[in-house]
Amino acid sequence: MTPAHLLALACAGALGTLLRAGCNAAALRWLGAGFPWGTLAVNVGGSFAFGIVAGYARARGGLPNGLETILLAGLLGGFTTYSSFAFQSVELLEQGRSAAALAYVAATNVAAIAAVWAGMRLISG
């Protein structure tokens, strides 16, 4: 990767992080702090976008000039929050909210897998 590609990758990661922070702030404002809705939405939405980009790239034999890496590892890597998901799951368990933790883990995994599949199907026709 050239220095320009590395800079683009870093900028895309920063943009993804800013988008994630905005989504989390909006979810907190609109839905409250009782459940990690923002992280759930970011992980599912990011998985859907990942499916679209990966499906598009797969159908065309890749994307030009490192764009695939910039979008997937940079933008969407900064946007999605698996470590936050894991931490928030543990927090729910520590709060004695086992049912909420189980629902969160199940919803995140099922919805994210479905979102990747849907994104890939959408782009492949």
Image (tube, rainbow, N blue to C red):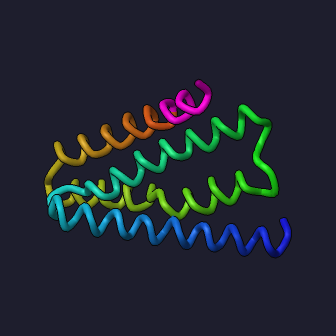
Residue displayed at 45% across by 72% down: 18
User: Which percent across, then down, holds residue 5?
Assistant: 78, 68
Vertical order, 88 against 114 (above or below) = below
| Quarter of the image with the C terminus in it | top right
| Quarter of the image with the N terminus in it | bottom right
Asked whether, in this view, residue 93 is left or right of residue 11, the answer is left
Nearer-the-camera pick, 41 or 124: 124
User: Which percent across, then down, holds residue 49?
Assistant: 52, 46
Asked whether, in this view, residue 124 is left or right of residue 31, the answer is right
Q: Residue furthest front?
A: 125
> In the figure, residue 31 lies in which quadrant?
bottom left
Q: Residue furthest right?
A: 2
Residue segment shown in magenta: 117-125
User: Which percent across, then down, holds residue 80?
Assistant: 47, 57
Which is the main secondary structure of the residues drawn in magenta?
helix
Residue displayed at 80% across by 73% down: 4
Q: How many numbered discs?
A: 0
Vertical order, 120 against 11 (above or below) = above
User: Which percent across, then down, holds residue 105?
Assistant: 32, 43
Asked whether, in this view, residue 103 is left or right of residue 50, the answer is left
Residue displayed at 45% across by 55% down: 82
Vertical order, 19 against 105 (above or below) = below
Asked whether, in this view, residue 108 is left or right of residue 49, the answer is left
Nearer-the-camera pick, 83 or 62: 62
Residue 123 drawn in magenta? yes
Residue displayed at 30% across by 58% down: 38
Residue 73 drawn in magenta? no
